[in-house]
Image (cartoon, rainbow, N blue to C red):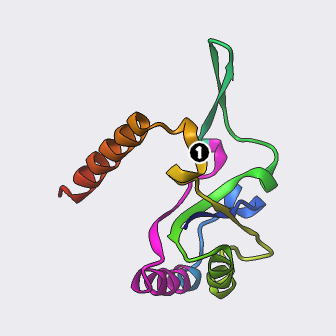
Amino acid sequence: MRFMVMVKATADSEAGVMPSEELLAAMGRFNEELVKAGVMLSGEGLHPSSKGVRVRFAGRDRTVVDGPFAETKELVAGFWIWQCASMQDAIDWVKRCPNPMPGPSEIEIRPIFEADDFGEAFTPELREQEDRLREELARKAARP
């Protein structure tokens, strides 16, 4: 099973406060454990929402809203994509993670949809298209 593991933003991360050298080193060691265990597929930190935008959809209309966004507790400061045997396995890995923020923080874990989750609506043609897209992504990722 794949999971998106999200580090929730804090007032500090939204203010652009960078992590300390010690925290960067601890997270680097944790990421190394994840990679060696075959768990981590990808992961990145995100700039504060002040550097982002949201695109709102209403029918055919698209409206761009510039950050920052007020509800810090709803924002994501970073993420991983993990491959784990179960939700419990992902929880166990998160419990080993260094606290990603200087103060109290929160990490959210959500399963990623797999093709079989969509049932009959995911037709053989749509599966073929998905397979082609994933193969193309893998080829592009393998290029220097």
Q: Percent x, y for residue 79?
A: 57, 62
Relative side of 134 to 101, left or right:
left
- From the image, tell me which residue sits under label 1: 118
Which span is picked out in magenta? Answer: 24-50
Q: Is residue 48 visible?
A: yes
Depth order, front residue of 23/41:
41
At mark 1, the secondary structure is helix
**Picture layout, residue 73 above or below residue 123:** below
Depth order, front residue of 126/80:
126
Depth order, front residue of 60/106:
60
**Picture layout, residue 5 above or below residue 112:** below
| Residue at far left of view | 144
Q: Is residue 38 magenta?
A: yes
User: Where the C terminus falls, by quadrant?
Assistant: bottom left
Q: What amino acid is labelled 1 in the image?
A: Phe
Q: Is residue 5 magenta?
A: no
Q: Residue at x 22, y 52 (%)?
A: 139
**Picture layout, residue 40 above or below residue 25:** above
Relative side of 131 to 75, left or right:
left
Q: Percent x, y for residue 36?
A: 40, 86
